[in-house]
């Protein structure tokens, strides 16, 4: 089912999304991948504030290629989400409502998604040129020294994703494979 | 004897890094187009269509096909009658990578030390494999390798008693474990035999063989066909979201090995199976 949502993502909207839904996201989202997650995790360990607000926001696991002149961003597809599994539950408990990436998540992340009524979306991996067309603005807001791994604030318009794990813990990767012959 | 100035190597590698990251080879292009027609899952078909749009945008607007423009893996096949002049060949290769990644707006994804993890900011050094051949030509293959799929690759040191079924199981295990992480539809490069490092290198190089060509060893060809069929019955599908197109090809290379061993390497590549080849 096709759905259109806005970020910040409300509790009601997050709960209405079901595994398998094709969703178009509009609003402000943030990028963070391995190195930025490590820094946020260390900041929390030191009881320091995070550089971005978690509540009702969406993090896109993505490190773009450089933008050519006159463009907001370069190629901008998702990276493998499981590398952020170590850090994600803590951010979800702080109110993070959505994550966009690709690939499997572990049980700790799935449980944190259910506990917090959040959503894990997949964007199509390896479609970075196409996905960049749904990003209208990009600005580094933290950890500039990390280059492609810095935290960026993105404005997105009808950014296409698919719900993989919903707030009830349904997992499209598991159900879809069975449908086409997997064991 | 042919003399080649290494600046020519730099220039070619620079262009090839940019080319490989924006255009797929005709065999890959064709395989992905065909997959749109054969895929049974509606969502899978939709994803494959998006990949078509993605390739078109990448080529027309010069946006890399994937943001992970990879670590530059370079195969240098050097004829033994070639003489290089103008400086270090290795430096010239890395300079080509540097220029390609900086001038071509490609992502710099290399860290200087695996544990200290400071970005080198120009995507060097490349991973370079040299091979001596006869004649006076140099054939360069630039194969930028993304790590979503690289991370899902495996080496299995099987026992001779595991036999062909053991090898098939190892390959299927690697593919199933990779699932959505490796950005299917994937290309599966396999090296069987040799030593620990030889099988891994064969698996990597097998990814550069056109996806519409089989091994010329009859039993290996049969294995490639059987495994492709089995992989496409796993249900993983495009993007791992279910379907009948999980792999576009299984490319297997073999090599003599030790009486005590049966090494198998599985190097998985995503649907952005990039490489550019030139002969100088």
Image (spheres, coloured by chain):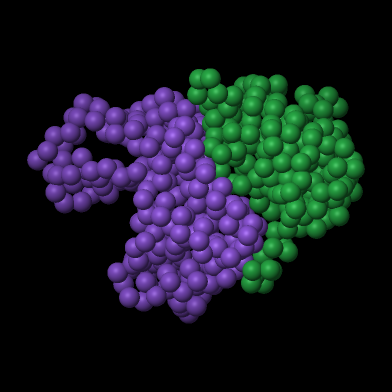
Chain colours: A green, B purple
| Residue located at (87% from left, 37% from top) | A10
Residue at 17 percent across and 33 percent down: it is B4
Residue that extends furthest to the left in the rendered view of this protein? B1
Residue A122: x, y in percent? 68, 47
Task: Count how many numbered circles sit on residues in the image.
Answer: 0
- Kindly indicate the quadrant of the structure image that contains residue B138: top left
Looking at the image, residue B224 lies above or below residue A109: below
- Is A36 drawn above or below residue B234 in the view shown? above
**Residue displayed at 47% across by 32% down:** B61
Residue A172, how many percent across, how many down? 73, 58
Residue B221 quadrant? bottom left
* Residue B97 in the image: above or below residue A68: below
**A70 lies left or right of B197:** right
In percent of width and height, residue B126 lies at 41, 37
Q: Position of residue A47 (x, y in %)?
A: 86, 27
| A166, A17: nearer the viewer | A17
A144 left or right, relative to B73 = right
For residue B192, what is the image quadrant?
Answer: bottom left
Q: Is residue A52 left or right of residue A33?
A: right
Query: Which of the image's four quarters has the C terminus of chain B?
Result: top left
- For the point 54% across and 68% down, the residue is B231
- The answer to whether residue A57 shows anywhere in this view is no
**Residue B85 visible to an observer of this rendering:** yes
Query: The N terminus of chain B is located in which quarter?
Result: top left
């Amino acid at each position: 089912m096709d759905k259109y949502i806005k970020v910040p993502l409300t509790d009601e909207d997050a709960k209405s999304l079901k595994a398998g839904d094709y969703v178009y996201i509009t609003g402000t989202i943030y990028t963070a991948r391995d190195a930025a997650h490590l820094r946020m995790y260390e900041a929390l360990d030191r009881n320091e504030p995070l550089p971005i607000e978690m509540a009702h926001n969406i993090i896109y696991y993505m490190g773009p290629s450089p933008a050519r002149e006159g463009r907001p961003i370069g190629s901008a597809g998702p990276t493998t989400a499981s590398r952020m599994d170590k850090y994600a539950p803590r951010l979800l408990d702080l109110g993070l409502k959505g994550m966009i990436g690709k690939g499997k998540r572990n049980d700790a992340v799935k449980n944190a998604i259910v506990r917090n009524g959040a959503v894990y979306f997949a964007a199509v991996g390896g479609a970075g040129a196409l996905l960049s067309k749904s990003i209208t603005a990009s600005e580094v807001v933290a950890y500039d020294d990390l280059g492609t791994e810095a935290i960026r604030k993105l404005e997105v318009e009808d950014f296409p994703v698919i719900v993989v794990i919903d707030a009830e813990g349904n997992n499209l990767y598991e159900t879809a494979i069975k449908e086409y012959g997997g064991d | 004897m042919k003399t080649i100035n290494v600046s020519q190597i730099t220039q070619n590698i620079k262009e090839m890094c940019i080319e490989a990251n924006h255009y797929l080879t005709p065999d890959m292009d064709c395989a992905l187009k065909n997959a749109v027609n054969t895929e049974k899952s509606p969502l899978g078909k939709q994803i494959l269509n998006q990949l078509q749009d993605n390739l078109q945008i990448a080529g027309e607007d010069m946006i890399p096909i994937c943001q992970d423009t990879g670590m530059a893996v370079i195969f240098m096949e050097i004829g033994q009658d070639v003489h290089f002049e103008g400086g270090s060949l290795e430096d010239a290769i890395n300079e080509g990578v540097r220029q390609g990644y900086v001038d071509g707006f490609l992502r710099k994804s290399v860290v200087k030390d695996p544990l200290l993890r400071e970005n080198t900011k120009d995507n060097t050094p490349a991973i370079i494999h040299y091979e001596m051949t006869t004649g006076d030509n140099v054939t360069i293959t630039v194969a930028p390798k993304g790590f979503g799929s690289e991370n899902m690759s495996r080496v299995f040191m099987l026992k001779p008693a595991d036999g062909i079924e053991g090898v098939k199981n190892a390959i299927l295990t690697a593919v199933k474990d990779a699932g959505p992480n490796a950005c299917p539809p994937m290309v599966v490069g396999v090296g069987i035999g040799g030593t620990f490092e030889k099988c891994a290198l064969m698996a990597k190089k097998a990814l550069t063989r056109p996806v519409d060509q089989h091994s010329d060893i009859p039993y290996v060809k049969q294995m490639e066909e059987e495994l492709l069929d089995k992989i496409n019955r796993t249900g993983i599908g495009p993007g791992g979201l279910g379907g009948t197109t999980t792999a576009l090809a299984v490319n297997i290379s073999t090599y003599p090995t030790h009486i005590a061993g049966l090494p198998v390497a599985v190097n998985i590549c995503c649907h952005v199976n990039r490489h550019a080849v030139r002969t100088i």
